[in-house]
Amino acid sequence: MKEYRTVELEACDEFIEKKSRFIGYVKPVKTQQEAADFISRVKSKHWDATHNVSAYVLRENNIQRSSDDGEPSGTAGVPVLDVLLKENLVDVCVVVTRYFGGTLLGAGGLIRAYSHGSKIAVESGHIITMAPCKILSVSVDYSFYDRLNILLNDIGANIEDSEFTDNVNVKFSLKAELVDTISQKLTEQSNGKYVLKELGEKFAKV
């Protein structure tokens, strides 16, 4: 399985366009049910909004869905979805809420506004790359801890847990193809004192 791009956080951002207020919401989702629940939650929160336009893309079965929620066909849901597709994002759902400000935007204006609402939502959710990673751990002396941190940071490892007891036990994830490299560097820098322990594998942020 290959790496993919998604968002890390549930987040939102907003802007005003000709007195219409647009609020872009984003959330990482894995299933159609999760997407539907998120859309429903935003709609409930903004029950008094003029429109709650939505789109989502799922990795599983390559599902893509969008809804104009009453806006003219093709001016809302599709532009929101297009942003996700152009950014190569999957497992992500966006809802752009609109409170009408009294001035019509026209088809072109709507497309631009909903695209922008989707884009700022996605940016606020923080785009990340997920890749097949090994989960590893290593136990080191306190005197070596700083050097280990530098080593992990330089190679792009994602530290998941650090436990400070008699030694420092560090659990981290790393792209599978980099495991041999870090193992070799750790051996060199510690004169063979420390050895990595492999705990498993998963998709993780890289």
Image (cartoon, grey):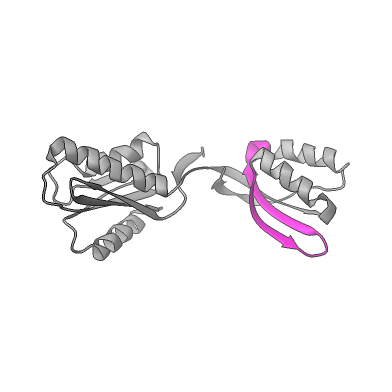
Where is residue 38? Give x, y as percent.
33, 59
Q: Is residue 162 magenta?
A: yes
- Compared across the picture, whether 14 is left or right of 177 comes to left
Residue at point 39%, 36% (across, down): 87
Residue at point 83%, 40% (across, down): 189
Residue 34 image-quadrant placement: bottom left
Where is residue 138? Give x, y as percent.
76, 52
Q: Can residue 58 be seen at all in this image of the molecule?
A: no
Q: Can residue 159 be seen at all in this image of the molecule?
A: yes
Q: Is residue 164 magenta?
A: yes
Residue at point 21%, 38% (across, down): 111
- Compared across the picture, whether 35 is left or right of 113 comes to right
Residue at point 36%, 42% (across, down): 62
- Span of residues in magenta: 157-178
Closer to the camera in the image, 120 or 206:
120
Q: Total of numbered circles in the picture?
A: 0
Instruction: Determine the residue located farthest toward the front in the rendered image.
Output: 19
Closer to the camera in the image, 115 or 101:
101
Q: Quadrant of the C terminus?
A: top right
Where is residue 86? Give x, y as percent.
35, 34
Closer to the camera in the image, 154 or 28:
154
Where is residue 18? Give x, y as percent.
18, 45
Secondary structure of the magenta portion, mostly?
Answer: strand
